Structure formats: structure tokens, C-alpha cells
Amino acid sequence: MTGRIAAAAARIALGGGMLLRGLWERRWPSLLVLVVAIVPVASAAAGPIVADAASTALARAGVQEGAAPERRGWRLSSEGGQVAGSARELAASAPFLLPPIDGMELVTPEIRTGRMYPLIWQDGQCEHVEPVAGRCPEAAREIMVSEASGFRLGSAVRLTAVAGADGRPAPLRVVGVYRPGPPGDPFWFGRNLFPQTAGFGDRGDALFTVPATARETRTPENVPWTSTAIVMIDPARFTAGGVAALEAAHALTQRLGPDNLIVVSQVPALIAELRAQSGGVGVPSLVVIAQLVALGWLLLFLTVRDLVTARGPEIALARLRGHGRLRVWRFALTEPLLLLAAAFAAGLAVAERAAQFAAERILPVPQPVALNGTAVLAGAAVPLGGLVAAAIAARNMAVRPITEEWRRTPRTRARGWVIDAIVLAVTGIGLVELLGGGVITQTSGQRASSLAVPGLLAVAAALLACRAVPFLARRLFGPTRRAGGVAAFLALRQIGRGPATAGSVIVLAAAFGMATFSAAAAAVVDANHRRVARAHNGADAVLTVNPDSVGGAAGLAAAVARADPSGRGAAPVLAVPGPPKMIATDPRRFAAVANWDPAWADRPLAELAARLRADSAPRITFTGDRIRLRMRPVRVPRNWRAQLYLDLKVPGEAKGASLPLGSPDRPVTEWPLPRRCRAEPCELRAIRGDVSIVAPGGGTKREVVLRILATGLEVRERGRWRALDAGLTDPARWRGTAEAGKRGLVLSLAAYGGLRAEPAGYPDPVPVLVNGLLTRNYLPGLDQAYLARGHPVAQTAALPGHDEVGTVVDLTVADAVALSVDPRVSFEVWVAPGHLAAVRAGLAAQGIATGEPRRVADLVTSYRTQAPGLALMLLPPATFAAAALALGRAVLALYTAARRRRYELSALDAAGVRARSLRAALLLEQLITLVAGTVAGVLAGAVAARVALPYIPEFARPPVTPPLLFDPPPAPVAAVVGAALLAALLAATVTAEILMRGIRVDRLRQAPA
Amino acid sequence: MTAAVRCQGIVQIYKTRDLEVVALRDVDLAVEEGETVALLGPSGAGKSTLLCLMAGLLRPSAGRLWLHGTEVSRLPQAALDRLRAAEIGVVLQNPARNLIPYATPAQNVAFAQRGRRADRRRIAELLERVGLAGVRRPAGGLSGGEQQRLAVAVALANRPRLLLADEPTSQLDAASGRAVIALPRATAAEHGTTVVAVTHDEAVSRALGRTVTIRDGRVGAEGRRGEELVVVGREGALQLPPEYHHLLPPGSRVRVEPLEDGVALRRAEP
């Protein structure tokens, strides 16, 4: 046994030792293979890691603090049943779910007031309210009440449905008083349990107790306790890969008991969103990664082939010794396989580091990165190229006659056209499909294949160049032989021979083609991201304020005016979702603050915004408790029932109020005003009338129109009537079915069509700026009621704040049009660069809190994190690295080829050719090859950028506006060209000098290599 | 007794893009087991080609070749590899070509051994015999003589029945040459190994039992025990040794006069 072990050890020592000696012998080519393999492995593997981190960032953004609680989990409830077990099963079904929050509740009237109170226990409840007095309930029949409820500490509260053993309502002792926490606390799962504190509704605030209360009291059979549980997603543990588990968890909720289980959740909406995002990230990244892998393959193929070819004599020796095929293959492949395996491991490690670096810079919230299956597969795909090269080269070594290995001049074989023809055909088809595919309206995944076109173009250019360069060299060879110097003659002859030239040109053209394209694409995409972000954000920074804190649209305008007296630092903006989306703002401030690109219109924004201003009649506003209309009575046909109304805009009433004034057959008609009008100004928006035909006939066949002369409008305030300045005699102040005259306002009431007379408090149609063709005439208005039409005073290519076709209107006009402000309207303050701190301070001084500003840079970051942006961001570093490697590999190949000719060059030296000429020949040979490959690549990349960029997705959701620009800026392309040529010149000079040192006459004593 | 090597009408033609070169023409040769043969002849005569054919490194363009009774002309490559591994040891012309330069002498011998297990005893024995025991330097760092001796040791690693050596003593001084040729001779004497060596070195040819001279791709003469004999080839062709060219210069017309035990050649015109 010992002998066997010793023999095995000896075998390993012999074999392993030789392997290591071989690696050391070929340390430079081995190192080159290692580096050439590590870089593409790292590039390819980093993509999926970053994409995964980006997906996780997007996923976590969907469930982070601030998102609706219903999107972040499930609330299970069962009246009379128990849900705790089901909740535990649900929480255990996915690793990112938090333990359930158990609870129970009963809604029942309080005996004394009859007000409905929810009696609640929710595990951890006291940590989510602010204790004011007393303590948390600990024992049965103890409760904690809100400050607003009015129950005193130590008092007893009796609820109808909570009875003691005697069947009478059990006294629940108040042991603590609380004040509710922030209303958005996800602990309450979006429920408003504190309406009493908020001051609206009839229901009382939650009364908190403990489970023992339920056990030690009785409830009627028809009013059982409701068992509840909340299961939430933990954002910190949720990743992009968790979507499937989330789906499974949600599916589980459909199967859980008890029978009357009610599940409240918006998780399906979250799942759908995440699915769309993850798909969007995946496809473009995959295409980019595939190109990087292909580029890595090309580089590795040539490098590994060189390495295996360098081992040709050894492989021949193995065959000479009669080794079996398997042993020969093993011998030939062990070294490259070992290197590729090491490169794979090192590449993955580098990828993880690089991904961490990129994630920290690209993602809005840095995410921890980790290797994933896709990254490993993408990384593993790269060494496969080297493996294929090794196998092909080893096979060539293994099958060709051994004696060929020792031939002084290897037999050359002509390159076939088959592969070239296939690549060119695929490129042509890809281009035709791309150019025929229409403009950029696609979603991220659908046209992601267009990302492959640059790679194909680069390879096609490389294949053409590698044939063209030796061909041209052979053509020029004749003239230089006759007339040129010996340097050009030698250089062109060597280039014309071809093998080193062809490989170098292919690699250089392909790599620099991709590098140029990626540089151009990154510049174009970055510019478009910034362009779109500037337009969509509207201003440099956007602050969102709570509508309640500013008191409506006019209040916002006033607050901004106080915060920025200069009028150039901030603008009030109400963003209405639409459609069409509408921005209501102060035109003057808007022009000073909003992001604007002169390319969007042929006039300055200030001039366009000024067109939004329009003269309007004064609005008819008032406070009071009653209103009356004086008129000259008219005789109403007998079969009519005519009714007049006053339409009012009332604070707090979304749709305003309509006051019925009765029939116009009386000289005065009056009606109480809504309660809010007593303290806050209400506005008369219309005098309206309608007619009901109560019986057929009526004595006349022609159409009857009652002409009612309104002579006065009065309001009673503090017991005294006062006339309103309603402008009843001013034709400029009224429009509709009314006519103002000297005697008053003549209201025309027809049987069909009724009556509608409106004070001209705003221009109709409303002047608007538009950035495209509007599909509907009416604007949404601040109240989303679509009351007024829009009249475009200018059409621009884009408008600040708009990501789709929309309008900008004067805030004063919009406020005059709207009856209220819809809750979906966003109250914003747009801030110009350099004014943010002052404006925030100015708003804060007025008690207006603002959250973190939304900046242009934030939007740019989010675009970069989206699928296509992320994919294109991954491309440049990898392609630049590949280009550097390609240059290094080409220089090495040229050096090796020239080194083999040292005998020949030494002979020329001995024959009297001057060293200067030999140096020039070497320099020229390398420069021509390097520059030809580089220039071919740069041209291919530039063409690819110009042709393909308009079709390559840059946004997950392509913006309708502003228009994107696709002309590659010259600077990045020039930088690539300049860097490449400089590097080529340096490399060629250094290599030529090194080679020159090896040219010595005494080398002629040795046998030619 | 079966011949170690039997060539019958061997023709070898090298084809290049534009022309064909006939390296061997109708070579008939038999080498008996245990014989030691020196292949002589001018450069380009086809000696190394014949050696490569015997080693199974080339397939003859025409004719048949048997090694130990096995016809190798049409033997599948795998079988030929096995045959070479089992029965043939080859020493190539340039000593460096026989060796893996970065491997130690022991690793080089082990590399040449058949099978997966290295026979360390055999390795030690061979290195001892070529005077390289204990040398751990890479083969590339050895002197020319050491490399050549190591090349012979490598060729003998599998105890071959046929040892083929191409110019084993070229680039060596006389003493080194003797040391190199001593090992094959000893092996032939001890184990009956057949040795065929291509050489220009008279010392080598003297050391071996038989000489075969190749001229213009044909077997022109053979020598045994100091006597040189012209070989009559197929179709009665024979090549006059160069030392008789002044009597019968190329282009001479001769009369063939039959004798009891052969023929006499006489120039037809003065």
C-alpha cells in the first residue's frame, strides 16, 4: 500500500512538476492567456451581477418605506375564525417575509354616545402610538384611548357588544391615553383607525386592549371578534430573485383557511410590476453580455491557439513516443485548461469586485452584490471560446504529420470564404431588419436584438479589413520593389504574407469597432438621459409639498412668492395627471425656473409663457350665510316646471354646490349658503336653469324662451344683506345663454337646452402651451372635471415637466376654472439651480414642510438603472478593456512574427542593409497593421453608432417627449481614435526597438529557427 | 526468423504545391532482429526519410513495410501509435528536438514511457547509464553531449525492440559521440535490440554491424565486416561506388560480360 502511495505521489510529482515547469517556460503567453481570459470573464459575469443588483434595487424600491402597505404584504382577517396559523404558514413560505403581526378587533357602539368604536388588539400596538398619559393595557378589560376621544384616564368605557358575565356591557377601564403616530405608518396596513383625531367622520378612534379582554368578556353571536394578521415583506431581504417566491406566497393565500378568510393585498400589482422590470433588465443586458462573450471568444481563440501552437513540438514529441490519442489530448489541453480554469475563478472574483464598484456608483441605493447563476454561466461561456480554440489547435497538432513539425517553413493554407460569407450575410440581414423596423417606439425587450448589430458590423468590417490589408500590401509591394526604399519593401512584403497581419487586424477591428460604438452609444445615451431627465423633472430641483399645508392653489402661489421674493428662484406648480397631463404654474416664474432647451421651440420660454396670461373679468366671491337673486318675474308656461340654480365653488367641496333658487316667476328668490361659505370665500360659478315639461301641450307650438332679467345678486353676512359686484350690466363679465345690458343680465331659459350663464372669471378657451397634438379639446383642470377647453398659443417639441403630450396653463386661470383640487394633483415647487436651500428655508419658515427634492440627477440615475440604460452602461468599460487587450495581443503577435525572422533580418544586416532601414521596416510593418485594424474598427463602430443608435432602446419606457438625438458627439470617438493610435505608435516603436536589439550578425551561426 | 524491418519496393514522394520530389525509389531492405545497421549516404539521399518510414512517422507512397512481421503501411494510426510506443525508440537528428527543454532528465524519460505509471527504476537505470543520474537541471540547460545521451535514454525508455537514430553523434566531439553510441550497442548486445542509425560518422558506422548506403533514393551498397558490396536493385540496376567513377564516369557505355559468378563491366569506347 505504501509503495502504491509513493508511486502515485511520484507520478503526480513528475507530471505536476512538468506542468508547472511548462507554465513557467511559457510564462508570458500563459500570462497573456490568463489576462485575456480574466477580463472577458469578469466583463461578462459582472453584467448579470449588476443587473441583478439593479433588479433588486428596483424590487426593493417597490416595497420600501413609503410604498402603499397593501403592496407590501397581506392582511388576513376572519370574522369569528382564527387566522394566526394561516399567517404563520404564509410568513414561512418565503424567506423575505416578516413574522406575522397578530391582532383582533371588534367594532361596536359606545353606550353613552352611540359612536362606533373599534376595540383592537394588534401585537406591538403601543410602539406605534405616542403615549400621552397612563400606560399600555396589560390585563383584561383595560383599554388605551386616543386623546381626541375625550375619555378620561381612569374612567370606564362601555361598549354595546362587550358584555360581562352578567350579560351587561362590561366596563373597560381607561389605563392610558395616546396620540396617533404618522398616518402612513405601515403597521396599520393603510387603515385609518384614527378618524376622530383627524376630525372627520362619525367613527371613533381605536380603543386598544389586550387579547385577555376577548377571553374574559362575551359578545353577541352575531357580533364576533375578527381575528386579524398582517404579513409584510421585509425590503432588506427582498431581492429580484424573490418574485417567484412572492407569487407562490400570494397563491398560498388563496388556499389558506378558515373558510371566511378575507385577504386584503395589492401584491399582485407589485408582482406584475416587478415582472415587467426584471424582464426589461434581462433582455438588453443579455444581448450586451453575449457580445462581450463573443469578443472574449475572439480574443481567447487567437491567444489560446497561439499558446497551443507554441507547444507544437512537445505535442509532436508525445506522438513520436507513441502516446495514445487520449494521452496526447490530455497533454495538449492540460495547460490551457488549467489557465482557463484559473482565469474563470479569478474572473468571477474580479467581476464581483467590479460589480460592487459599479453598483455603488450606478444604483440610487447601493445594493450588496453577489455572484448568481447567470453570472457564473456568462463567465463560463467565455473560457469555452478558449476551450474550442485549444481543441481545434490541439486537433491540428494531433492529426498533422509529425514530420511537419520540423519543417523550416510551415505549409500555408488559403483561408476559406465560408465563415466570412456567413458573418457578412448575417450582418446584412441584421441591418436590413434594423433599418426596416421603424422608429424608436418599442419597449425594452422587443428590439433589444438591435444591440447585436454593432458587434456584427465590427466583425464584418474586421473580416473585410483582414483580407483587404494583405491584398493592398501585395498590390503596393511591386511599386516599392521598383521605386520605394528597402524599408517599405520589407514591410509590405511581410504584411502581404498575411498570417500575423490577418489575425491582428481581425482582433483590432472587432475590438475597436465595439469600443468606438460603445463610446458613442454611451455618450448619446447619457446625453439623451440628461435631456429627458431635464424635461421630465421640469426644473433643477422639485419639492413636493402637502396641499393641506399651503391651502390650495392660490396658497401655494402665495407661499412661493413669500419664499422667493425675487421671482427667479422658484415657481409654484400643480401637476395634474390628465390626460392630457397639465402643468398649472405662474408663467413668469415658470419661464425663469423651468429647464428649457432652445431647440424645443423657435421662441424663448419667457415669450411663450407670457402668452398664457389673459385678461379676465373679476371673479364673484363672497362669504355669508344666505344668497338671493333679484329679477323681473316672468310667466312660466303652465306645463313647465322651471327651476333656477346658483352653482358655487365651495372650499372643501370637490364638485362645488348647486343651490336651488326655485321658479323665476318671483321677483326675489333666495337660499341658504353652504356652511363653509360663512367662513371661507365661495365663488359664484354659474346661474343655471332647467325646465321639466310636466304636461303635454301648453298652448303654443313655437319654441318658448323665457327671458329673465336678473337685476341684483345679494349675500347676507352677519344678518345684513349686501349687494355683490356681479357685473350684471357688464357684457364683458358674463357669457353663456345670457346677455348683460343696462337694466341687468338677461337670462335666456329654453325648454330644450336650459340656461347657463357664467361669470367670465377665466378665459374660455384657456390659453395653453402644448408639446404635441391634443387628442381631446377639454383640459382636465385642477379638479379633473374637464370644464374648460384649451387653446394652444404655442406648440413646442417638449415642455418642462412632461413625459407625454400635455399642456402648461396659467395657475391663476386653472384655479379660476376648477371647482376644487383633485387629490391626485401634485403640489410642487420648482426650484432653479442655486436657490434650493433658500427656497426650502423660506417654505419652512411658513410652516410648510418639504420632502427630499426630486432632482434631475436622480432621474438620470434611475434611467441608468433601467434595463437598456444599464446594458449600455456596462458596455464601455468592457469593450475598452477588450480593445486594450486586442492591441496588446496584436503587438505580441507582430513581435513574435518578427522575432521568427531575426535570422532573415540578421542576414539583411550582414548584407549591408542599414539598421535605420531595418528599424523603419519593422516600425512600418507594425504601424500599418495596427493602424489598419484600428481604423477599420473605428470606422465600423462609427457607422454602427450612426445606423443603429436610433433603433436601440435607451429607456425602459420610451419617452414621447422630448425628441431624442442620436448623432454621436465627435469627442468620445476622437478620444478612442486618438488613444488607439497613440498606443499603437508607442507599442510599434518599442517593439521595433526591442526587435532591433536581437538582430546580430553572429545569429547567422545558429540554425534558422 | 522474422526480420525486424522489411522494406519491399518502398517509394516515397514528397508533394509540394508545384512539384513532386521522389525521395526513395523501390527500396528493398531487410534488417534482421538484433542487427545493428548504419544508414549511410550523402545529404538528401533519403536516409532520414527511410528512418521516418521505419518509425511509422511517414506512410510510404508505394511499396510495403513490415516491422516485426506487422505491415505498417496500412496500419490504422492508433495501432501504429501503439506499435511505436511498444516497440520503437526514436532519436531525432537535433538532440533538442528529442527533449522537452524545461523538463528534468527524469521527467523526459518518464514522459516517453508507455502507460500511465512511470517506471522509476528504469528511469534511474537509464540515467545512470548515460551519466545523468541525479541531474535535476532542465534538459534545455544540458550540454549538447548530455542532451544527445539523454535523447538516447529517452528513446530506450520503453525497452524498444527497434531503436532508430538519426545522426545521433552529429554536433558532438569524438568522446561524446562514443559515449552516445555505446548505449545502443550495449542494449543491442544485452537485449537483442535492433538498431538502425543514420550517420555520417565513420566511428558510428564502424561500431555497427552492417552499413547500408543510400544514394539517390536507392539502396546502393551494403557493407559487412569491413567489406563494401554494391547492391543490385530491382530491374538489375546497380550504383557504382563513387570511387570507381573515374573508371566508368556517368554517361559511359559499358559492355556486360558474363562470368561464372557474376558479370564484368567494361567500357565500350576508349
Image (cartoon, grey):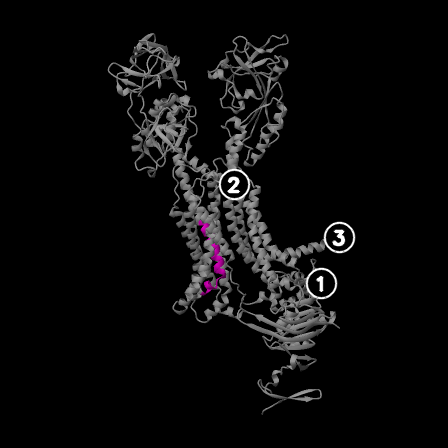
In the rendered image, residue A567, in percent from the top left (x then y), is placed at 32, 28
Q: Which residues are magenta?
A: A493-515
Q: Position of residue B63 (x, y in %)?
A: 65, 72
The secondary structure type at the circle numbered 2 is helix
Left or right side of A587 for B14: right
For disc 2, the neighbor class at 10 Å (few under 14, some 14 to 19, many from 20) is many
Q: Is residue A233 left or right of residue A590?
A: right
Residue A45 seen in render: yes
Rendered image: mark on residue A282: 2
Circle 1: element type: helix
**Kind of residue at badge 1:** Arg
Amino acid beneath label 2: Gly
Question: Neighbour class for label 1 at 10 Å: few (<14), some, many (≥20)?
Answer: some
Q: What distance separates the C-alpha of mark 2 from that of mark 3? A: 56 Å
Give the residue type at disc 3.
Answer: Met
Residue A612 versus residue A978 in the image, above or below: above
- Chain letter, disc 2 residue: A
In space, the residues marked 2 and 1 are separated at their CA atoms by 61 Å
Residue A681 in sight here? no
2 or 3: tag closer to the N-terminus = 3
Q: Quadrant of residue B156?
A: bottom right
Main secondary structure type of the part rendered in magenta? helix
Q: Nearer the viewer, residue B266 or A577?
A: A577
Same chain letter for marks 2 and 3: yes
Residue in the foreground of this view, choosing between A876 and A837: A876
User: Which quadrant, please, contains the N terminus of chain B?
Assistant: bottom right
Q: x and y percent of residue A684 in the render?
A: 34, 17
Residue position marked by numbered label 3 in the rendering? A1
Spot the residue most to the bottom.
B270
Residue designated by label 1: B122
